[in-house]
Amino acid sequence: MPKQIPNPEVAVKEEASLTSLVKEKMKMFFIKIANVIEYLSIVFRNLFTNKFEFQEFLKQCYQIGNNSVGLISITGIIVGLVLTIQSRPSLVNFGAVSILPGMVAISIIREMGPVITALICAGKIGSSMGAELSSMRVTEQIDAMEVSNTNPINFLIIPRFVAAAVMIPLLTLYADAIGIFGSWLGVNIKDTLSLKLFIAEAFKNLEFIDIFPAVIKSFFFGAVIGLVGCYKGYNAGRGTESVGIAANSAVVTSSLLLIIVDLIAVQITDLL
Amino acid sequence: MEESNNKIVISIEGLTKSFGDNTILDGITLHLNKEENLVVLGKSGSGKSVLIKCIVGLLQHDTGSIKVGSHEITDISEEELIKVRKKIGFLFQGAALYDSMTVRENLTFALLRLKEKFTTDQVNEMIEEALENVGLPDSIDKMPSELSGGMKKRIGLARTLVVKPDIILYDEPTTGLDPITSDEISHLINDTRDKFKNASIIITHDINCVKTVADRIVMIKDGKVYKEGSLEEFTSEQDPYIKSFFK
Ligand SMILES: Nc1ncnc2c1ncn2[C@@H]1O[C@H](COP(=O)(O)OP(=O)(O)OP(=O)(O)O)[C@@H](O)[C@H]1O
Ligand SMILES: [Mg+2]
């Protein structure tokens, strides 16, 4: 078979289609940005002007807690345990084992607790919001709500978003507590230390400035998870395949945004 | 002229709607009279569902005008649109029951969101009556996932009728139902009209249903009104396209 000679005409065409492809992508990107801005402005306008659906909010809080508390417990204990077991040898080398409880507590409260809780919730809560709302979109339930004189932003999105923003800080505090308990278990593999003493050690050097920014941070994590999950679900396409797409991209996008928010938060707390 | 205008509850003129390059409705003009059952016929994908979604403002039309009573739907304000929607009942093609709610909650939701306050007893009574009408009184505490396709459709119908709207838009009310139930639903559409004096647009492919309910028929083809007339005019039509519907 003769060697294929590149056809210049095709090459030119490909180049042209490449630039037009890039242009098309850029255009889509800006349209998306505009959509997101519009979505946020609608959500926040509705949040402050319309009646708050308290019943739905409570339902969502319960679901968020109920769906993720088990996973958070297991992960929290293991993270506390692993952090402790891994830090111990280096601290032994420096003869500084006594700071172990305080050190682990700070890293759990400042970083591990909020981030791990948020990532778990992005997977568990964000995906279920994406899937639920997109399937409601596909099966015209959202349209049905609208003709029944119910604003879907108000009834579906705001309760979910607010519930996530309220529940994720609470779950984070719970994860912190469980993680510290896990750390105590870790300490007790090699030493014996009573829980009371361990907690006293752990909290000795802990200050308000360690806890407060972490809570604020997890509030924003919750808001991101709720807003992204609802955005992906609410704006899903019309076919059944969009349910999977919405759930998946809710997780991917919110996880990525969480890390970015974390980065920003760390810069801000650094200034304090 | 004045008098005939008073009889019209919905009037649509030169309605167009496209999705991207895909023109679905291309200048539809039709009207719905008081207490009338208007059947809309057309091939699958001809834009019948799009048409009635434009009427309730779920989709925004491109050009033309839609008037519901005295309200013009084009560029309507939020408050006005709510007023219009309170008058209109909408049966979705896929029933669109709320998955997370029981049948009772589905009906209660529609009732309480659209009408003024009722007592719990009144609500229960109305819901039971509505379910009785569609022949499913026992499914009141079931979840939609426990119902068959045809049952969902009937619950969707009950959810539409429980509100007792002035205008009802039925999107294929008898599709997927057995002949006996289809017949019952067709008669229910007539009974509802006789009782509550509402006007209806009924989208259907079911010729038996057409024969039972139709006061007037509009056929849509290529985004335009292809023919309008009474059942007799349609059945005696020689046009092969129309004949193929009435075989
Ligand atoms: N939201 C939308 N976005 C893009 N295209 C749409 C949308 N809604 C409907 N269409 C397209 O409009 C056309 C008409 O759809 P419609 O649902 O009105 O058909 P129909 O007449 O009700 O058909 P059927 O009898 O099968 O229900 C279809 O080609 C559909 O793909
Ligand atoms: Mg349809």
Image (spheres, coloured by chain):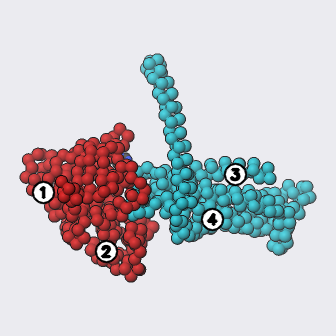
Chain colours: A cyan, B red
Q: Amino acid at mark 1?
A: Leu
Mark 3 or 4 closer to N-term? Answer: 4
Which chain does tag 3 point to?
A: A
In the rendered image, the residue lying farthest to the right is: A95
Real-space Cα distance between discs 1 and 2? 31 Å
Which chain does tag 2 point to?
A: B
Which element type, helix, strand or loop, lies under badge 1? helix
Do marks 4 and 2 share a chain? no
Q: Nearer the viewer, mark 1 or mark 4?
A: 1
Do marks 1 and 3 share a chain? no
Residue highlighted by disc 2 = B131
Q: How many numbered callouts?
A: 4
Q: Amino acid at mark 2?
A: Leu
Q: Residue at x 46, y 55 (%)?
A: A134
Residue highlighted by disc 1 = B231
Q: Amino acid at mark 3?
A: Asp
Which element type, helix, strand or loop, lies under badge 4? helix
Real-space Cα distance between discs 3 and 4? 18 Å
Left or right: residue B40 versus residue A26 is left
